[in-house]
Amino acid sequence: MEDEFSVPARLGMKAFLARRWAVFIVAYVGYAACYFVRNNLVVVSDLMTKELGWSAVAIGSILTGFAISYGIGKLIMGVIVDHLRLRHSFAGALAISAVLCILMSFQRDPAVFCLFLVAIGLVQGACAPAALATIGAWYPASQRGSRIGVWNTSQNVGAGTLAVIISASLAFAGPSQWHIAFWLPGLIALACSGLIFFVGGDRPWQEGMPTLKELYGSRALPEVQVPADVSYWRLVRVHVVGNRTLLLLATLNTLLYVLRFGILSWIPIFGSDVHAMSPHQTSVVITMFEWGAVPGALIFAWIALKHPWRVTIPAAVGIAVLSLLILAYAFAGTPVSVAALALPMGALIYGPQIIINVLTVQFVSPRAVGVAIGWVGLGGYLVGAALANLSLPRIAESIGWTSGTVGLSVVGLACVFICIRLRRAERNAAV
């Protein structure tokens, strides 16, 4: 192991590696906790329609408010994260969103719910850029892809665990106690924000640790290098906003979010309306979807580790298979088949999203990782999630949930085409 490091840095190697593991674990747990205060309404959406009389369109509008604010927040907060201590911005964003989620448990007006979720979206925009910037600061380019892939599963662990927490709580308290779905996960997330603040990582040099360059030499640096005298805003304008490869990645991310939220946001209502599934059964489907993403994400992380510049074609193949699975999901005959299909669909939606994160970090200067993550993620929430949350319930009201879900498979084919286009940029970068 020591051969990986330059001679002057070997003295601090053991302390660096030990600290790096702690930093990664906190980044993983912290980002999983972010989903304890984001997907709550999705899990209990069918209950909200029955207990409070909300319509599917109203719920879709609320979720769209969050999606738009989160997309904007990710871009704005990405810039802020690039200039702040990482653990402070990460812990602060999670703490504020946890408090807002707890306060939501006292609300019954959908407009007020929307305002709270919009605020959570803006604040939580700091969490992914902070976590990814932390990983980018502690791992060299050769290891970054696999670590990002593993970290990416934290969102699925968090969302799947949230469904279990809410389902168990409602089984104990009764379905009329829907507010427990907000205040209990909020309290857990608040505790996790304290963990991030006291144990989470900053950039190594801010903690008195050696830099990646001191440890790994030139191998620590990403493929994209920008002269130090280039200003931050010129870097953003030319190398982020003006980067055609990042634009393609942003487009792919947007379409994958249409697929992700086109399925995930409507599992409770689709399952209830089409298959007469109970809230417990739809919670199982959500958990299968989210936890199924974990092995899929790990497989794509392994591909990124073994073949760091040959990841787009596996992503294209995975999404092509996903399109077929969505067709099967649309015409599934039983609750068991719905749950069984949710597992591989989750794997093949979240797996390719890891490839987007990996390539984004690899195609941009380390000085602008935060804003690049925000830029690529902007379309995912601002357009992709908004389309899925707004259009699908309206389509379902006109032609049914089955027909609306079939349309998602066409979106998958567009994703395949973009992956093929990205292969050229990937091949050029590997030269």
Image: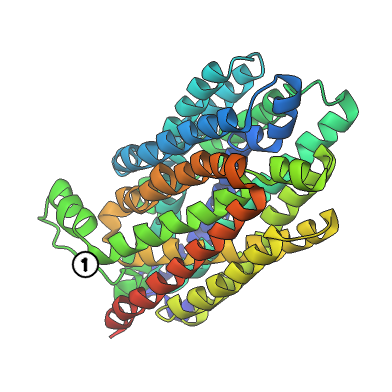
Q: Give the residue displayed 43% in from the left and 67% down from the top.
A: 414
Residue 140 location (% of width, % of height): 40, 68
Residue 154: tell me if it is visible. Answer: no
Amino acid marked by disc 1: Gln
The total of numbered circles placed on residues is 1
- Image location (x, y in percent) of residue 402: 66, 53
Q: Relative to 147, is 366 on the left or the right?
A: left
Query: Which color scheme did the rendering employ for the protein?
Result: rainbow
Q: Is residue 242 above or below residue 277?
A: below
For the residue pair 127 and 86, the one nearer the viewer reads as: 127
The crowd level at tag 1 (other Cα within 10 Å; few <14, some 14-19, many 20+) is few
Residue 15, horizontal then vertical, whole percent:
51, 59
Residue at (37% x, 52% y) in the render? 373
Disc 1 element: loop
Q: Is residue 62 above or below residue 264?
A: above
Quarter location, residue 34: top right
Is residue 402 visible in the rendered structure shown here?
yes
- Please state, as top left, top right, bottom left or bottom right, where the C terminus lies in the image: bottom left
The furthest residue to the bottom? 431
Residue farthest to the left, as pictured: 229
Q: Residue at x 66, y 67 (%)?
A: 325
The answer to whether 63 appears left or right of 343 in the picture is: left
Q: Quadrant of residue 176?
A: top right
Residue placed furthest toward the front: 398
The residue at the far right in this view is 172
Closer to the camera, 57 or 4? 57
Is 275 placed left or right of 48 in the picture? right
The x and y percentages for residue 37 are 60, 33
Depicted 68 relative to depicted 392: above or below: above
Residue under the point 31% across and 69% down? 222
The residue identified by callout 1 is 225
Front position in the image: 340 or 245: 340
